[in-house]
Amino acid sequence: MAITQAMSRENTKIGALAPLVGYHLRRASSAFAVDFAAAMEGTGIRQVPFGIIAVVAGSPGINQGAVGRVLGIKRANMVSLINELVDMGLVDRTVDETDRRAFALTLTPAGTAMLEDCLARIDAHERRMLASFSDDEKALLLDMLRRIEKARVIPLS
Amino acid sequence: MAITQAMSRENTKIGALAPLVGYHLRRASSAFAVDFAAAMEGTGIRQVPFGIIAVVAGSPGINQGAVGRVLGIKRANMVSLINELVDMGLVDRTVDETDRRAFALTLTPAGTAMLEDCLARIDAHERRMLASFSDDEKALLLDMLRRIEKARVIPLS
DNA sequence: TATTGTTATACTCTATAACTATA
DNA sequence: TATAGTTATAGAGTATAACAATA
């Protein structure tokens, strides 16, 4: 049987999914995730741990629960994520003397260096994924995505 | 210690994540997923199985592998997803007589009814999530998301 | 009583490798 | 030899419930 070009492209018949923003958000996010993983190769850093590193860098001394609330990660799931970053020597975890239930999180020098390396890789990754976007389009997209994030109160912890 | 309003809102200090399209895509997609799940309550249908139902409806007789390629789902992972839909009585799976290795997938009458019910729920869900968006903005967003999906060739099967 | 962190557990989605049966 | 489907398995992400220590 001859393989036509239309067939080899699988013809993209997504039926009722075509007009759904939710579907295309999911696929676009997935495409970003695949390229993100490729961009991070060799660092051992994934999307979620990178988010934690960025938040800790932005608010040194922040505790686990607060990081989770900012990123939409449940307390229970923060534990192993922070353990991983501490084990990698990227995050320092000390008892918060103003609230001895909590841990104060900061980046180690290695954590700061890792953040810088990741940010350089992510800059290239974002340029790659958005090569066809003008600066105005990129700003418009960011604004729309932020509006969607706020459209529903994300349940936390 | 007094809790200020800024503190209770957690102050949204996402640091280096703020300008990253990949981060906001992920959070926006997640917000859609949460509201999607709420919208589907009682149907037993999740995002991925809904995608399969929609693709089968759009291409009756399509086989598992083709559905997977359209949706970015690996062959191995299609098996249990199709089993689930067959067990729910929504999808009919018969041997494709033109290629006896493959299964021809079609929706049962119950599957067609489920699709209609889901589409009505999803219509309300999308309107809810995009309440602040004009028709032009929505079209612009869809166009941008489709461009991102194509920015990287998604590896399939 | 409420909150921080913890453990245990489960479900969904995704990934790879090896197998069978057909083509 | 390539492809359709299958099985087994593993890693991530996310969800809930119950507990100890501290506020």
Image (tube, coloured by chain):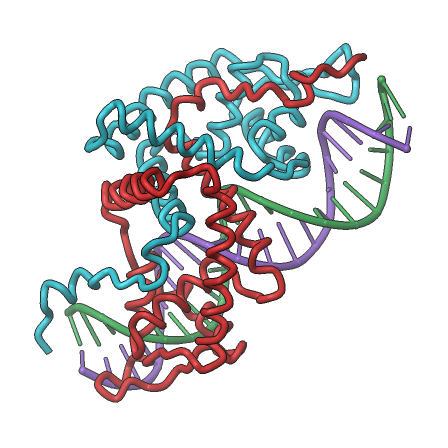
Chain colours: A red, B cyan, C green, D purple
Q: What x and y, as percent, mark residue D6?
A: 72, 34
The image shows a total of numbered marks equal to: 0
Looking at the image, is B138 positioned above or below residue A35? above
Q: Can residue A43 be seen in this view?
A: yes
In the rendered image, which quarter is residue C21 located in?
top right
Which of the pair D22/B135 is nearer the observer? Answer: B135
Measuring 36% from the left and 62% from the top, which residue is drawn there? B16
In the rendered image, which quarter is residue A37 located in?
bottom right
Q: What x and y, as percent, mark residue D21?
A: 31, 85
Task: Name the quarter where the N terminus of chain A is drawn.
Answer: top right
Measuring 16% from the left and 63% from the top, which residue is drawn there? B8
Which of the pair B39/A132 is nearer the observer? Answer: A132
Looking at the image, is B9 positioned above or below residue B109? below
Which of the pair A101/C10 is nearer the observer? Answer: A101
Q: Residue furthest bottom?
A: A97
Task: Name the quarter where the C terminus of chain A is drawn.
Answer: bottom left
Measuring 60% from the left and 37% from the top, which residue is drawn there? B153
Name the side, left or right, on which B52 lies relative to B26.
right
Q: Is residue B42 visible?
A: no
Q: What x and y, as percent, mark residue A151?
A: 23, 41
Name the side, left or right, on which A60 lies relative to B49.
left
Looking at the image, is A140 positioned above or below residue B101? below
Measuring 24% from the left and 42% from the top, which residue is drawn there? A147
Which of the pair A78/A67 is nearer the observer? Answer: A67
